[in-house]
Amino acid sequence: MKTPTLLHCADDFAAQAAAFLRPEIAQAVTRHAICRLALAGGNTPRAIHGQLVETGRDLPWDRVQITFGDERGVPPDHADSNYRMARESLLDRVPIPAGNVFRIEGESEPEAAARRYEARLAAVAARFGEPRYVHELLLLGVGEDGHTASLFPGSPALDETARSVLPTLGPKPPPQRITMTFPLLNAARHVCFLVAGSDKRGVVEQILAGDERYPAARVRAARITWLLGWAA
């Protein structure tokens, strides 16, 4: 793993993040004929999605395949659904074919939903001749406790070495989650962390120092970029 790149986006986090992501998406399509893009959950991506809609009209959206780093155990129309947030802020506003959006079934029994999602990704990987699905670009957030996706401190999912997707539990409601695991996250060509609030500066510094008490410190993809919402 190379040393992570730190980009400080203190002026307008959403606009600067979108400006960074646009060419990454376009270049992935140029290099690989597709951009397999994993979206992050939570609130931070919403404004970035809005900027991508406004400034990324010329992107090859028909060649973008969407996955989700995690999902909460709720139906797709629920206010807590990561899919709903992405649909409202991005997916319904750009010309991505419906078949290119791989939704995690948060409303289903968690183990069954995790295995179905894992199988869907594995089928695509097999067509590419890959041992595991490879994202060209994978977006992640970081919680105040250092979690990423739905990989929380102390979770048994942190020690998974074979499965790509697992059911897990979070400390806040809704507790039931389905998450990508480290083997899948670390198979990505490029992971980009989106951290808007300076209130997370302390935990990010500890993650960057390699403190593995924080799950985000265990993401070791080939290329990692941190987009940070504070000045250097």
Image (cartoon, helix red, strand yellow):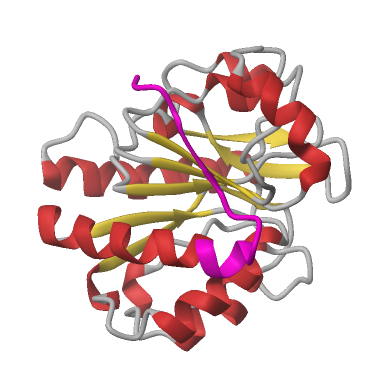
The correct choice, above or below, for 122 with respect to 46 in the image is above
Q: Quadrant of the C terminus?
A: top right
* x and y, in percent, of residue 191 in the image: 43, 40
Q: On the picture, is 126 further left or further right than 52?
A: left
* x and y, in percent, of residue 144 in the image: 81, 36
Q: Per the image, is 7 magenta?
A: yes
Q: On the picture, is 112 further left or further right than 119?
A: right
Q: Quadrant of the N terminus?
A: top left
Query: Which is nearer the eye, 110 or 26?
Result: 26
Q: Residue at x 76, y 43 (%)?
A: 176
The correct choice, above or below, for 189 with respect to 67 in the image is above
The correct choice, above or below, for 169 with respect to 209 in the image is below
Query: Which is nearer the eye, 201 or 119?
Result: 201
One can see residue 83 in this view: no
* x and y, in percent, of residue 94 in the image: 41, 84
Q: How many marks?
A: 0
Query: Which is nearer the eye, 211 or 160?
Result: 211
Q: Residue at x 20, y 59 (%)?
A: 27
* x and y, in percent, of residue 137 in the image: 36, 49
- Residue located farthest toward the front when viewing the structure as drawn: 232
Q: Residue at x 29, y 67 (%)?
A: 64
User: Magenta segment range?
Assistant: 1-16
Q: Per the image, is 90 magenta?
A: no
Image quadrant of residue 78? bottom right
One can see residue 43 in this view: yes
